Amino acid sequence: QSTAFYKSWQRKLLVNEINAKMKTKTDLTSVLTTIEPDLRSRISPLDFSSTTRYVANLTDEFRSATLRTHSRTLFNLGIDCNVHPLDPNKVIFNYSSTIVPDRVKFLLAFGLDFCLPVYRMDFYSYFLAFEKIFLVLKDRSREVIPEFTDQLRSIASKYYYNFSPQKIFSSCISKSDIHLLKQFGQYKNIIVSQPDKGHGVVIVDKNKYIESMTAIISDRSKFQLISEPIHSYTLKIEDKINNFLRKLKDLKMLSADNYSKIFVSGSGPGKLYGLPKIHKSNFSTMFQFRPTFAAYNTPGFSVAKFLVPILNPISRNEFTLENSHSFVNDLSRISNASKCFMTSFDIENLFTNIPLKKTIDICLLQLFTDPNSLFMGLSRKFFKT
């Protein structure tokens, strides 16, 4: 009875039952509105008060029993109606000059990854998902059956055009909450972010954020100012990468399959943002941010993605830890661990302080043990380029 198919049908039956009960409630409310004045005119005020109190007690008992039954049913379906956020005073860190309403704090305490109810479907993102399904199946099969294509199109259209926001139910978020969050999102003088470490929601004045991030990128030893328009500069980098890949392909040093995977097209500039280091004791006065660069759309991303599995093996040695699980295993092998001390060293802005040219030379030294050796059919000079 716990299969996904069984639960899906339970959910459908539950929705139909809720709709039927809502219609019954509307009908009974209409009847009550009609008979209440008539009853009041037929009996004395004392009898009317006693009768309404007796009916109210019966209703309360019935409501309590019904709620217990529904709670068990929803629990068996995997639906928890008692969803509560963490304590807002422990997970909401407001370092801004803006006063955040208590209800907004309550909603933010669910976390920035909390999924809000969808009251309006986006046309492009919805149908794009079905197009991706079709393309994946088309790549895996030489021929896609026309009947399947028609059915997929029919399913996509049916659920999009029959979508009704009135049927959306959330046990903890109401439409007024959505409106309240939209109003909060219109504040242009603050930024809302997750912290650099741990979980929570951080609110900071936008001018402090811009000031701190500007100071980071103003370091000309780490960052270079581009004088030409970003669009033309991006195209120039694209052409440089593609010309080099085309040269490797013509020399039979790069397969056609890898060439198509790495080929750069439609790229753009990356996005730099900062995560607030609220674990620092002086964050409220210094406002330190960890710079993070989202490079997924940059010209060099496809090449970097291609090189990751190639360079990953040479980044490991006897001092490398894969994850916290391997760290615990290593500690358990130390016989006198209780007599040892553990410490960690923090490097300020680690990645921007790594010498790039020296790192490349170290990688080449690991990959090309001999000056005349080849790696993936490439010489040291070509690979470095």
Image (tube, grey):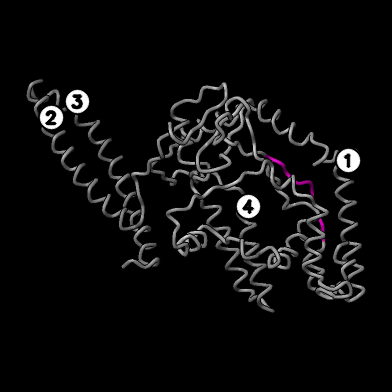
Mark 3, Cα crowd under 10 Å, few <14 / some 14-19 / many 20+, is: few
Nearest the camera: 185 or 347? 347
Left or right of 74 on screen, residue 339: right
The Cα–Cα distance between marks 3 and 1, rounded to whole angstroms, is 77 Å
Residue 96 position, x and y percent, is: 57, 25
Residue flagged by tag 1: what amino acid is it? Pro
Of the residues tagged 1 and 2, which is closer to the observer?
1
Residue 135, by quadrant, is bottom right
The residue that mark 1 highlights is: 229
The residue that mark 2 highlights is: 53
Mark sitting earlier along the chain (2/3) = 3
Left or right of 81 on screen, residue 289: right
Segment colored magenta: 264-273
The residue that mark 3 highlights is: 37
SS assignment at label 2: helix
Of the residues tagged 2 and 4, which is closer to the observer?
4
The Cα–Cα distance between marks 2 and 3, rounded to whole angstroms, is 16 Å
Q: Residue at x 46, y 31 (%)?
A: 105
Mark linked to residue 125: 4
Dominant secondary-structure state across the stretch colored magenta: loop
